[in-house]
Image: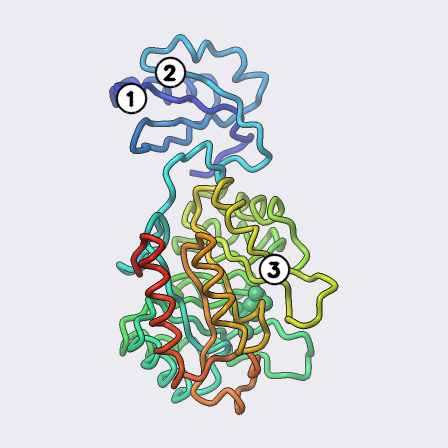
Amino acid sequence: MAANGSPELLIVMGAHATPEQVDDVVARLAEAGAHAHVTAGKEATVIGAIGERELLATLPLEGFPGVEQVLPILKPYKLVSREIAPDPTVIDVRGRRIGDGYFGLVAGPCTVEYREQTLETARAVKEAGATMLRGGVFKPRTSPYTFQGLGVDGLRILEEARDETGLPLVTELMDPRHVEAVVETADVIQIGARNMQNFILLSEVGKAGKPVLLKRGPSATVEELLMAAEYVVKEGNARVILCERGIRTFERSTRYTLDIGAIPVLKQETHLPVIVDPSHAAGRRDLVPALARAAVAAGADGIIVEAHPAPDEALCDGPQLIPTAEFAAFAEEIRSLVTLMGKEIG
Ligand code: PEP
Ligand code: MN
């Protein structure tokens, strides 16, 4: 539900509150011109009250039957905060899950280059146990003279790969003009690091009926990432997966600096799943397995990794691509660590 005003208060219902009591609180908020964001948790239902702070302050919410306590939401991010939904969000994409004990293993080419390259990669990662297929058709390239992606034609290749392997598709949307085409084909819409604060694009995907993979900008703080996710959820799309993909620091031995600390911080601050992209962080394939292992150990809900049948011939990100021939061994190692962490591949 899209709402005006910001979620200011958290109404925690008692463990024995009845559905009628919850409905009553929602109705009283509506009467007063406010909105309710209801989350049924395992322990209790919490209601986020959305509206003007002054108006909400006039309501005797604490006295309503079934209400246990009323708390202000102090963080600038509201709908994505842990407070509003104490249970972790699990995102189901065509039966594959990410979050709360389900680990997403997303893999595939950086870029859809041609049919055989994409299909071969899809088959290899599927065989190795990947849960989703990644692949960009609209590419954010630093140089305007390099391959920019196949565009809509690439979406047809991805569809073929999905038909054959059954893997849900993760693909990047860069431009509001492509929303319709990408949303129709993608199972998860990727918003790339460079677009993390493209607020128009965020609002557009907030209205789409597909989950969103939101990558952290290379110079964005954790709080800015959460505020970007808030733009999507505010429009009514609560299925957002956050992705740490490395930030820009003074260090040059890796392409970016993987901010491992961001994983436990995000897990504390939000109910949304958090995954890691070790490929773009490392920029070198020899470092990708170590960064991926670190991500699992730090509590990530998944990883998104780039693979290619012949990395030396790749049109984009060659040095960081894992050869498909080596992908099964890599996935096996990740799987053991995931089990050690008490999780399962989703
Ligand atoms: C990608 O996933 O191919 C990509 C371009 O990633 P990022 O937006 O994190 O740079
Ligand atoms: Mn890439």
> Answer yes or no: do the residues labelled 2 and 1 have beta carbons within 8 Å?
yes
**Real-space CA distance between mark 3 and mark 2, rounded to the nearest whole angstrom:** 41 Å
Q: Nearer the viewer, mark 3 or mark 1?
A: 1
Judge from the rendering whether residue 325 lies leftward or rightward of residue 228; answer left or right. left
Judged from this view, the residue extending furthest toward the right is 250
Identify the residue shown where x is 60% and y is 71%: 140
Quick one: label 3 or label 2, which is nearer the N terminus?
Answer: 2
Image quadrant occupied by the N terminus = top left
Q: Which mark is residue 68?
A: 2
How did the renderer colour the structure? rainbow
Identify the residue shown where x is 48% and y is 21%: 33
Q: Which secondary structure lies at badge 3? A: helix
Q: Nearer the viewer, mark 3 or mark 2?
A: 2
Q: In the rendered view, tell whether residue 74 sits above or below residue 280.
A: above
**Residue that label 3 marks:** 195
Q: Is mark 3 within 8 Å of ligand 1?
A: yes
Identify the residue shown where x is 53% and y is 47%: 229
Q: Which secondary structure lies at badge 2? A: strand
Q: Could you tell me the amino acid type at mark 1?
A: Ala
**Real-space CA distance between mark 3 and mark 1, rounded to the nearest whole angstrom:** 41 Å
Judging depth in this view, the residue of 331 and 26 nearest the camera is 331
Q: Is mark 1 within 8 Å of ligand 1?
A: no
**Real-space CA distance between mark 2 and mark 1, rounded to the nearest whole angstrom:** 8 Å
Quick one: label 2 or label 1, which is nearer the N terminus?
Answer: 1
**Residue that label 1 marks:** 15
Q: Residue 17: percent from the left, percent from the top? A: 28, 19
Q: Which mark is residue 169?
A: none
Q: Which secondary structure lies at badge 1? A: loop
